[in-house]
Amino acid sequence: MSVDSPTDPARLHALEREIARGSAQTACAKLADEPDAVVAEVLGRMLPPHALRILDQFREPRRAAVLAQVPESRRRQWEINASHPDQSVGHLMVLPVGVFPPEMCIRDAIEGLREAVKTAFISYIHVTDAEDRLIGVVVMREMLLSEPDQTLADIMIPKPFALQADAPVADAMREAVQRHFPVYPVCDAGGRLVGLVRGEDLFQQRVFQLVVQAGSMVGVENEERLATPWPRALRLRNPWLLVNLLTAFAAGAVVGIFEETIGKLVTLAAFLPILAGQSGNTGCQALAVTLRGMTLGELAVQRPFAVVAKEAALGLLNGVVVGALAGAAMYLFARNESNALGLAGIVFVAMVGSCVASGISGALVPIGLKRLGADPATASSIFLTTATDIVSMGLLLGLATFFLL
């Protein structure tokens, strides 16, 4: 049973905007002292996934009290949404309204709409058969121009476009981007109408995913915002920094193996950060393009092997250019030494090899994470940086050890 909120609409709107800026934990803290009815009404104004994340932050007695203030239809909607995977279309949908059978006449459909529009905004009429399968959509304009005795089957658009409830939001965006409908029907695997998704909600959720992607690449969780308290921000970031520390030890171990080489060829030490930085940037470029291709659905058209081959070729060409410059710089730097030409050649070869390896790694890391069922953007740059550091430093020091010592 729903209870009217004692708070005026202006304050509700201000409270909704305030909690939308922070994480779910921050929103829970801001709503902690509000009446249950106010919390229920504010959450009801938000997208279902955001509302569910905030609701999950409350302890069980308070969560049950808040849910008791939520209308039954919305509670049922949230239960359905929670049954679908996170970041899926089903997580965003609302319960379908304006749903009628095909044999209903226009006159009766209009009467049914008079009641439905009192509690919901209706853009289309959705026509379903006896088993709730979506078979057609009726545009309001056709309703106005039709005869009262005509049936919905006479004026409906058959076999309408619909989204799948379990489809990822990114895939749904690729399907919907050329259509720009205000509302999209959502069906299950059997074609039954299970909900509706407003176009603006679909785009808003996708924009949110793209915004947090840059943070995910370096281990910043999706939940963290500028307003997130520092203790929670520390808990969210520190595990990935520990992972980065372990991978840094791996790169440091490579340098340790060639400690004797560095001791005899001190000049190489000046070029280690140059090599690591250049190869790292090459890998990050490949990573950014690959992630963008995944987001836009281009990876399905361009096979993964072609993507990796392209990045390897670009790494080779870029490596030749920057390697020649780095080799020349090494020759000038070590021109007073007897092995200056050899050092220059080793820097050139190491730069080319590390750029090729970095390009391949930048493409393979997100593709590999996706194949393993993980988020391709999650901490991808941490793994990429480790690979590029190990390859670049190991290649430079290894070549110097083999050819000059």
Image (cartoon, rainbow, N blue to C red):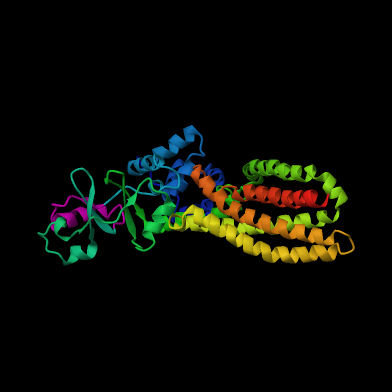
Q: Is residue 108 magenta?
A: yes
In the rendered image, residue 16, in percent from the top left (x then y), is placed at 48, 52
In the rendered image, residue 230, in percent from the top left (x then y), is placed at 66, 46
**Name of the residue lying farthest toward the right:** 336
Identified at 67% across, 44% down, the residue is 244
Q: Quadrant of residue 345?
A: bottom right
> Which stretch did the figure color magenta?
98-122
Identified at 27% across, 51% down, the residue is 97
In the rendered image, residue 222, in percent from the top left (x then y), is placed at 55, 48
Q: Nearer the viewer, residue 72 or 286?
A: 286
**Name of the residue lying farthest toward the front:** 403
Q: Nearer the viewer, residue 344 or 303?
A: 344
Does the rendering let one see residue 150? yes
Does the rendering let one see residue 10? no
Horizontal placement of 65 versus 266: left or right? left
Horizontal placement of 383 versus 269: left or right? left
Horizontal placement of 355 versus 170: left or right? right
Q: Nearer the viewer, residue 17 or 131?
A: 131
Q: Is residue 300 magenta?
A: no
Quadrant of image for the N terminus:
top left
In the rendered image, residue 113, in percent from the top left (x then y), is placed at 22, 55
Identified at 41% across, 53% down, the residue is 171
Report how many numbered discs are placed on residues in the image.
0
**Name of the residue lying farthest toward the top:** 61
Compared to residue 77, the image places residue 342 above or below, namely below
**Name of the residue lying farthest toward the left:** 149
